Structure formats: structure tokens, C-alpha cells
């Protein structure tokens, strides 16, 4: 990594405190399910334990702590000018199953560190500053991601509150269980947020391979998630001849292969970034001596342009049923779970980030994000921008996820300097 202007003794000579930041991250990295590192799933008891830790650290930093209607945890520092509005630094503290210690939570802790650094430096910002842990950014058991940031930005459709999760609990009840008040989401929509910043690990290989200190995100891909149910007939595995079976898994194999091949073709077409993943796969009854009667898939697709996504959706609706029918089974349901457009981050904030990065002597580049983020929804109500820090080998959503203390400190110092510029605007 390029020599960033802070000494290698691991202590930056900037306002942010690298060790304090790192200690909080490692403490949160220990508040995880005992048998599956590193897992802290939204809505779980372990998630609430992580929030207890964050709330305590918010209070110790002198922030007023609250849970908003959508279940987001917010630490607020009042500004000197009540008419100036609020600047927010956010991300998420939930993980994927078997995830890492940095995805999301690094951005929440970085926001906390920025506020502590403001206090250490005796700086009283004009704007109020909020550090936000957005509820359930990762795809949750309710079939929805970015629950809290959708709620805060008027993007949580009422029908989504009826999505159900484990034990048939509604998303509405789960948000309430997290301290939210779903019935007040609409009434408490925010109009005071004047800007949103998010620090996140890149979850890719660009910064590390080009030895850059930080990335400034310009575009965040659109994400569409589709649930497909393939129905056949459960039958005795021993007595049902091959030509008389209605094997749902045989159909699912063709459907998944068709999705893979279409995604490879779109990715290779040179019209922009496109990926598709069959990440969830449920087989019923999932018994060795029963011909599979039903398969449920969840497909996660990402596109840099709406044109690419529309090409994929047209393919899915037109071609997938024939692939299933070719195996004597049918697609009994094809449901769009969520469909968010690609997002352009705010250019003005991107320029502030670049300016601050140059002033700090950091090497940087503007880049696209293949991962989804809470910033997507904040960009709908306020100027929003993101800072990426390198992560080892680009690995993420796995226990090997890693970012060095000084890389995180550099990104946090950039947040600090950029927030100061936003506060002075
Ligand atoms: O899946 C994503 O893109 C993000 O990590 N939630
Ligand atoms: Mn993630
Ligand atoms: Mn994330």
C-alpha cells in the first residue's frame, strides 16, 4: 500500500485515533454467534448485544442515543446552529451468516470515531451530527435488505411490513422488537438531513491491486432479487421410473444454469457491470429417498445500468419457464422481492472527498460499487457519498474479511475532514 502520511507506528498524526477505532471494531467482532464466526444477524439476540455495546460507546462519546421509527440506532450530537440541519454518517452492524468483522460495522465505528475526534479537537459543528447504525442492511430472513435505511428515507413500502420471517413473524413485529415504531415511520420521515457519508470496506480488489489508500464511490449498482418456486411431484425414489418423474430439482438445475449462462453473456457484452447469483436454494422435502417435489431459489442480480437489468428480467420471464418445462416441471411462482435502481452518488460530495483526500496526502480513485449499501436509499432524500477502504484480497462476506488498522484510520480521517468541509458549507 502507498505510504500514507502517518507514521507506521500505527498512530495517525490526524485527529482520529486509530487504536480507539480498532479496539471498538475488535470488541464488536467478539459479539458474534459462538459457533459461526463472524455472524451477528439482524433481529437476533446477538445483534441486540452488539447494539448495547454501540449504545454504550455512543453515550460515552456524549451522543444522545435513540432508536427511530424504522429501528435504526442513532447517536446525535447537537449542532450550534439549530437551523443548519443534520449531517449523518451511517452504515450497518448486522452481518451475513459466516460474514466478516468489517462489512458495515467499520462504517458505524468510523462515524463514532469522527465525533470523538471532533470533541477531542474542541470542534463544535454548526450542523447536528448523527451516527447511524441502519437496521438490517444485509438480506434478512424477511427477504429484504436495507430495512432501516428504506424506512428512514420513505422507501419501505407498506406491503413489505407484512413480509414474514422465522416463526412467521412479520417484519412489522420484528422492527417493533428492535425498538422501532412501524406505525410512525411515515409520520417521522426526515427532512433535516443535509448530507450523508458512509465509509465501507471495498469488498473488491481494485484498491489493493492498485495500492490506493481510498476509493470515492461514484455509482452503486442496482440490485434486483427474485424468488423462484419450481414445482414437480414428490414421489418414491425407488418405485418411480425415470420417465414418469416430475423432479423439481431437475428443473431447478436447468433454471440455475440458464441464469448463470445469461449472466456470463451480459457481463461479457461490455455494456457495463452485471452479475447474478443463486445464493439461496431450498429443496423439499430434501430426503434421499424422495423425488424432490419443490425447489425455492432466491436470485440476487446486480447491474450498473437499468438497461442491463431489464435485459435480464425479460430473459427470466420469457426463457426460464421453458427450461423448467423441458424437465416436465413448472415455475409455479416468480416473485420480485426487491428492485432498487443503480445510484449515482452526489458529485459535489465526491469532489469534497477528493479535495480532502488530496489535502491528507492520500492516494484515491473514483469507482463503482458492486455491493449494495444504505447510501443507496439516503441518496433519494439527501446528497450521499461513500468512501471505500481496501480489504485484503478483496474478500468479504466471509471470515477472512480483513482491513488494516491504518487503512481504516486513513478512511476515517478522510470522513473527518470531509464532514468538516460539509459543516462549513
Ligand atoms: O449484498 C450486498 O451488496 C451488501 O453487502 N449488503
Ligand atoms: Mn454485506
Ligand atoms: Mn455492507
Image (cartoon, helix red, strand yellow):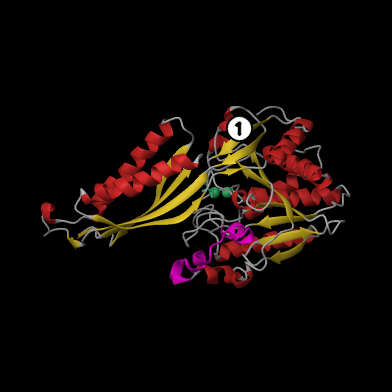
Q: Where residue 400 sits: x, y (%)?
A: 53, 43
Would you identify the image quadrant in which residue 263 lies?
top left
Placement of 4 over or under 47, stated as above or below = above
Please state if 68 lies on the left or on the right of 7 as rendered. left
Q: Residues within 10 Å of mark 1 (few under 14, many from 20)?
A: many
Q: Is residue 9 visible?
A: no
Please state if 62 lies on the left or on the right of 347 as rendered. right
Q: Where residue 389 sits: x, y (%)?
A: 64, 38
The foreground one among 87 and 211 is 87
Q: Where residue 418 sits: x, y (%)?
A: 76, 41
For the C terminus, the image quarter is top right
Q: Give the residue displayed 87% in from the left and 52% down from the top.
A: 124
Q: Is residue 221 visible?
A: yes
Query: The residue tagged with tag 1: helix, strand or loop?
Result: helix
The foreground one among 123 and 49 is 123
Q: Where residue 352 sits: x, y (%)?
A: 75, 38
Q: Which residues are magenta?
A: 147-169
Q: Which residue is mark 1?
A: 207
Would you identify the image quadrant in which residue 335 lies?
bottom left
Placement of 391 over or under 324, stated as above or below = above
Instruction: Specify the principal SS of the magenta part.
Output: helix
Please state if 361 lies on the left or on the right of 282 as rendered. right
The foreground one among 207 and 68 is 68
- Is the CB of the residue bearing disc 1 within 8 angstroms of ligand 3? no
Would you identify the image quadrant in which residue 286 lies?
bottom left
Is residue 256 a member of the stretch shown in magenta? no
Q: Give the residue displayed 76% in from the left and 33% down from the top.
A: 355
Amino acid at each position: 500500500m502507498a505510504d500514507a502520511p502517518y507514521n507506521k507506528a500505527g498512530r495517525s498524526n490526524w485527529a482520529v485515533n486509530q487504536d480507539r477505532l480498532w479496539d471498538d471494531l475488535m470488541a464488536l467482532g467478539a459479539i458474534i454467534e459462538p459457533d459461526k464466526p463472524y455472524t451477528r444477524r439482524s433481529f437476533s439476540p446477538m445483534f441486540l448485544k452488539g447494539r448495547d455495546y454501540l449504545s454504550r460507546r455512543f453515550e460515552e462519546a456524549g451522543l444522545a442515543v435513540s432508536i427511530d421509527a424504522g429501528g435504526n440506532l442513532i447517536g446525535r450530537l447537537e449542532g450550534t446552529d439549530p437551523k443548519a440541519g443534520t449531517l449523518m454518517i451511517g452504515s450497518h452492524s448486522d452481518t451475513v451468516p459466516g460474514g466478516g468483522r468489517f462489512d458495515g460495522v467499520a462504517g458505524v465505528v468510523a462515524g463514532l470515531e469522527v465525533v470523538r475526534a471532533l470533541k477531542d479537537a474542541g470542534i463544535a459543528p454548526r450542523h447536528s451530527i448523527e451516527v447511524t447504525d441502519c437496521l438490517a442492511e444485509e438480506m434478512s430472513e424477511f427477504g429484504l435488505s436495507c430495512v432501516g435505511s428504506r424506512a428512514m428515507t420513505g422507501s419501505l413500502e407498506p406491503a413489505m411490513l407484512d413480509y414474514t420471517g422465522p416463526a412467521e413473524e412479520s417484519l412489522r413485529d420484528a422492527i417493533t422488537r428492535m425498538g422501532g415504531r412501524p406505525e410512525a415511520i411515515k409520520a417521522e420521515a426526515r427532512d433535516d438531513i443535509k448530507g450523508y457519508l458512509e465509509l465501507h470496506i471495498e469488498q473488491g480488489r481494485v484498491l489493493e491491486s492498485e495500492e490506493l489508500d481510498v476509493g470515492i464511490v461514484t455509482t452503486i449498482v442496482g440490485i434486483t432479487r427474485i424468488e423462484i418456486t419450481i414445482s414437480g411431484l414428490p414421489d418414491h425414489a425407488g418405485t418411480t421410473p425415470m420417465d414418469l418423474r416430475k423432479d423439481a430439482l431437475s428443473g431447478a438445475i436447468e433454471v440455475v444454469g440458464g441464469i448463470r449462462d445469461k449472466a456470463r453473456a451480459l457481463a461479457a457484452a461490455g455494456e457495463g457491470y452485471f452479475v447474478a447469483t443463486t445464493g439461496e436454494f431450498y429443496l423439499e422435502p430434501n430426503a434421499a429417498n424422495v423425488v424432490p417435489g419443490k425447489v425455492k431459489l432466491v436470485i440476487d442480480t446486480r447491474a450498473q445500468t437499468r438497461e442491463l437489468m431489464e435485459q435480464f428480467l425479460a430473459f427470466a420471464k420469457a426463457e426460464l419457464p421453458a427450461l423448467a418445462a423441458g424437465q416436465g416441471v413448472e415455475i409455479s411462482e416468480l416473485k420480485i422481492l426487491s428492485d432498487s435502481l443503480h445510484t449515482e452518488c452526489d458529485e459535489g460530495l465526491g469532489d469534497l472527498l477528493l479535495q480532502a483526500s488530496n489535502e491528507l496526502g492520500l492516494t484515491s480513485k473514483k469507482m463503482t460499487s458492486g455491493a449494495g449499501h444504505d447510501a443507496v436509499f439516503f441518496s433519494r432524500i439527501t446528497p450521499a457519498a461513500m468512501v471505500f477502504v481496501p480489504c485484503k484480497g478483496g474478500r468479504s462476506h466471509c471470515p477472512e474479511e480483513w482491513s488494516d488498522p491504518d487503512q481504516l484510520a486513513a478512511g476515517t480521517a478522510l470522513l473527518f475532514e470531509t464532514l468538516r468541509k460539509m459543516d462549513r458549507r
